[in-house]
Image (spheres, helix red, strand yellow):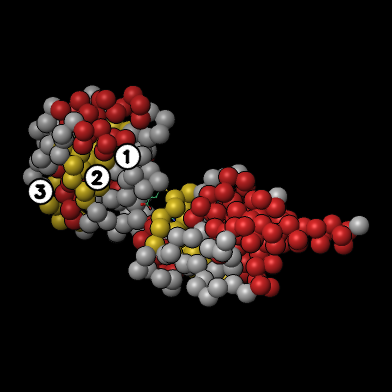
Amino acid sequence: MPAKNTADSTEQRSFAINGARVVVPHVSGGLHIVATPIGNLGDVTIRALSTLAGADIVACEDSRVTRVLLDRYGISRPLTTYHEHNAAEQRPRLLAWLADGKSVALVSDAGTPLLSDPGYRLVVEAAAAGHALVPVPGPSALLAALVLAGLPTDAFFFAGFLPPKEAARRKRLTELAAIPGSLVFYESPHRLGASLADMASVLGDRPAAVARELTKLFETVRRGSLSTLAEEFSAAPKGEIVVVVGPPLDTPPEAGEIDALLLRLLDAGSVRSAADEAAAVTGLPRRDLYRRALELREGERGAEG
Ligand code: SAM
């Protein structure tokens, strides 16, 4: 059974706002995927509160974090955990509760579950088993950052966290380079400077924004080119970070810019990888870029000799 909070299933289900208590109906059976605030506890929807207060069980990543939200709104429901380290054992248990007709409210520590957070496999298996799935939409750092960035919002790609190691990160950036829209990344503060520098080198010096501590006391957004932001954040800032990068620059690059890009890429890798990355970034034929990269490398060797 889930760990008991203080309520049992016979207790009246309710939440409270500013001292006013609202009684809610028992939430119907199924998996309810509930978005919660990303910092400011005021950013919770009335429907999220009703679902959390009316569900049989709340499945959360860290009960200490979720209890802060539930306590703030006077909600007392049984909590159980579902996180990356216990998902394999917990999933069958949650699916069994769903099969038993119970309502399970899934939350993560912040924002929308499944977005760089646990829940995807649970949703897949709950859907396959024919259980009802109910989204309760609300905050997500991805959309909060995107709307602040001052970059195109008509098409965007959410890329989650980049790989921590440089070679894998650059490879991933190369795959993303030709996407015709803004790119949104989650990033940890201590990798921010290195990631921005790799973005500038692989994606080209696009306009970008770094959004920090969204909805919290020290919310800030810095806008600029990737290279200026890389310099600004070479020392790790504090707090939670989203990086938004503008779409590929649409004017075809001039010969000098292509050479500058190839030289930067040659600094970090082989002629072959420089040609691959430059082709992904510029959309120009790889064969031409390979030939030019080779000339530049030979030129560098000649200068050294
Ligand atoms: N599921 C969440 C969502 O919908 O936004 C994101 C969870 S992910 C594990 C956590 C990452 O989201 C953080 O490392 C940071 O990149 C971003 N994030 C979460 N809250 C944030 C905030 N208040 N300000 C800026 N970024 C935030």
Residue position marked by numbered label 3 in the rendering: 23
Alpha carbon separation for disc pair 3 and 1:
31 Å
Q: Is mark 1 within 8 Å of ligand 1?
A: no
Marking on residue 120: 1
Q: Earlier in the sequence, mark 3 or mark 2?
A: 3
Q: Between tags 2 and 1, which lies in front? A: 1
Q: Is mark 2 within 8 Å of ligand 1?
A: no
Asked where in the image residue 40 lies, by quadrant, the reply is bottom left
Residue position marked by numbered label 2 in the rendering: 33
Alpha carbon separation for disc pair 2 and 1:
11 Å
- Residue 191, percent across and down? 59, 51
Marking on residue 45: none
In this rendering, does residue 19 appear at all?
no
Going by the numbered disc 2, the residue's amino acid type is Ile
Q: Between tags 3 and 2, which lies in front? A: 2
What secondary structure is found at the residue carrying circle 1? Answer: helix
Alpha carbon separation for disc pair 3 and 2:
21 Å
In the picture, which quadrant includes the N terminus?
top left
Measuring 22% from the left and 29% from the top, which residue is drawn there? 95
What secondary structure is found at the residue carrying circle 3? Answer: strand
Going by the numbered disc 3, the residue's amino acid type is Val
- Residue 184, percent across and down? 44, 59
Asked where in the image residue 263 lies, by quadrant, the reply is bottom right
Q: Between tags 3 and 1, which lies in front? A: 1
